[in-house]
Amino acid sequence: MSLRTFEAQTPLEVLLVEQALAVARELQRVADAAPDGRVLAAVESAAVPAGREFTRQAVEAALQAQAAAAEKRGHRGGPAPGAASGSGPSGRPAATS
């Protein structure tokens, strides 16, 4: 196996590369520890939740980075177009229950 060097350009890239390496190492550990005939099942059992968590953290970090950049630019949140209106999609007042 050849060693590689990666250069991350952003904090998000650093986080994702570190997490990807951690997931890869955990999957290798699980595969090495699994009994013969159970390697696939063991690795799949570890990979699915690890992949979900990896994706969740990636989305969270990306959204936090975007929000921080928007705050720096001074953008302020506000209601979505039409959200302040009391009318429904047809232009008539929205139904209430």
Image: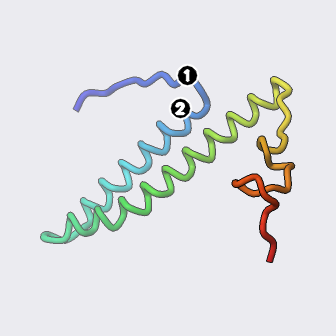
Question: Which numbered marker is on residue 63?
Answer: none
What residue is disc 2 on? 13
> Mark 2 and 1 residues: CB-CB less than 8 Å, in contact?
yes
Instruction: Point out the residue furthest to the left here.
Output: 37
**Which image quarter: residue 68?**
top right
Residue 79, given in percent of the width and then of the height, sits at 83, 44
Task: Name the foreground residue: 56 vs 76.
Answer: 76
Q: Residue at x 86, y 26 (%)?
A: 74
The quadrant the N terminus occupies is top left
Q: Residue type at mark 2?
A: Glu
Q: Residue at x 79, y 63 (%)?
A: 94
Task: Left or right? Give the position of 8 relative to 32.
Answer: right
Q: Residues within 10 Å of mark 1 (few under 14, many from 20)?
A: few
Residue 14, given in percent of the width and then of the height, sits at 54, 33
Q: Residue at x 77, y 43 (%)?
A: 80
Q: Residue at x 81, y 55 (%)?
A: 87
- The number of numbered badges drawn on the structure is 2
Task: Left or right? Give the position of 27 relative to 93.
Answer: left
Query: Is 6 above or below relative to 46?
Result: above
Task: Name the foreground residue: 82 vs 62.
Answer: 82
What residue is disc 1 on? 9
The quadrant the C terminus occupies is bottom right
Q: For the residues marked 2 and 1, what is the alpha-carbon distance in whole angstroms?
A: 6 Å
Task: Name the foreground residue: 71 vs 9.
Answer: 71
Query: Is 70 above or below relative to 9?
Result: below
Q: Residues within 10 Å of mark 2 (few under 14, many from 20)?
A: some
